[in-house]
Amino acid sequence: MKRLSALILALVLALGAVPALAAVDFDPSLYSPDELKEIMEMISDYLREAQAGRVLWDRDGILAEYRGPVRWGAGRWIVNLYIENNTAERIFVGFSGEAADGFQFHTGNNGAFVEPGVRYLAEPNLGFIIDAANLRPYGLTQLQTFTFTLDIKSGSGNETEVASVPVSLELNLPLD
C-alpha cells in the first residue's frame, strides 16, 4: 500500500494535478530517505519525458523538435534536437543566450548544419551538450530550467534568419 501511495503521488505531482492531492493519503514519515529520493527521481523522469516530442518550430519546410535529454557520460547531457530540412537550401540550427537556472553559460557543439532534404538528430552527432563542469562554478548540482534561443538560418553563408525562437525546458537533471 505504501508503494502504491508513492506511485500515485508521483503521478499526481507530475501531471500537475495538485488539487487532487487531497485524495492521496501520503505521509513522508513512512518512507526512508532513499525511498523519498526514488519517488522524486520518478517525478523528474516523468517530467523530462513529458517534454520530449515538443515541437519548437514547424514552418517553411523546417521542423525542429525537442526529443528529451540524453546522458552522455558523467556530468554531461545532450539536448537531443531532431531537425528536418525540407527546403532547397542548407540551414544552420544553433543555440544562443543559453542559461541554466538563470546563469549564463555556453553549450558545447551548439550548432549544426543540415543539408536540404536531410534529417538531423543531436544524440548521434554529439551536438548541443550541457557540461556540468561549466555549471559547477555557479554552485549548481542539479539543472532545473534550461533556457535558450533556437536560431535557424539559411543561405550560403547563413545570412538569412529564418527563425529566432525562445525556448524554456524544465529538465531537472543531476549534474554528477
Image (cartoon, rainbow, N blue to C red):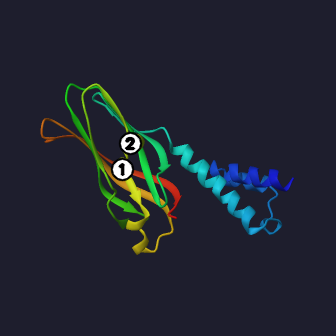
Q: Residues within 10 Å of mark 1 (few under 14, many from 20)?
A: many
Q: Against 84, is 101 above or below?
A: below
User: Is 158 left or right of 51, judged from the image as shown?
Assistant: left
Amino acid at pointer 2: Ala
Instruction: Say what secondary structure mark 2 lies in.
Output: helix
Question: Residue 80: x, y in percent?
Answer: 43, 44
Q: Quadrant of residue 49?
A: top right
**Image height check: is 149 above or below 103?**
above
Eyeballing the image, is 134 above or below 23? below
Residue at 72% across, 63% down: 36
Name which of mark 2 and mark 1 comes first in the sequence: 2
Amino acid under label 1? Phe
The front one of 165 and 83 is 83
Residue 128 marker:
1
Horizontal relation, residue 141 to residue 3: left or right? left
Q: Is residue 133 left or right of 41 when viewed as pictured?
A: left
Q: Which residue is mark 2?
A: 122
Q: Is residue 107 above or below residue 69?
A: below
Q: How would you rate the neighbour count of disc 2 (Cα within 10 Å): few for under 14, some for 14-19, many for 20 or more?
A: many
Residues at discs 2 and 1 in contact (Cβ within 8 Å): yes
Identify the secondary structure beneath mark 1: loop
Residue at 42 percent across and 49 percent down: it is 79
* Closer to us: 96 or 71: 71
Work out how far the residue at label 2 is from the one at label 1, CA to CA, in angstroms. 7 Å
The picture places residue 96, in percent across and down from the top left corner, at 28, 54
Say which residue appears at 66% left-offset and 59% top-offset.
40
The furthest residue to the front: 73
Q: Position of residue 172 (x, y in %)?
A: 53, 58
Pick the residue in front: 131 or 84.
Answer: 131
Whole-percent x and y of residue 123? Answer: 42, 43
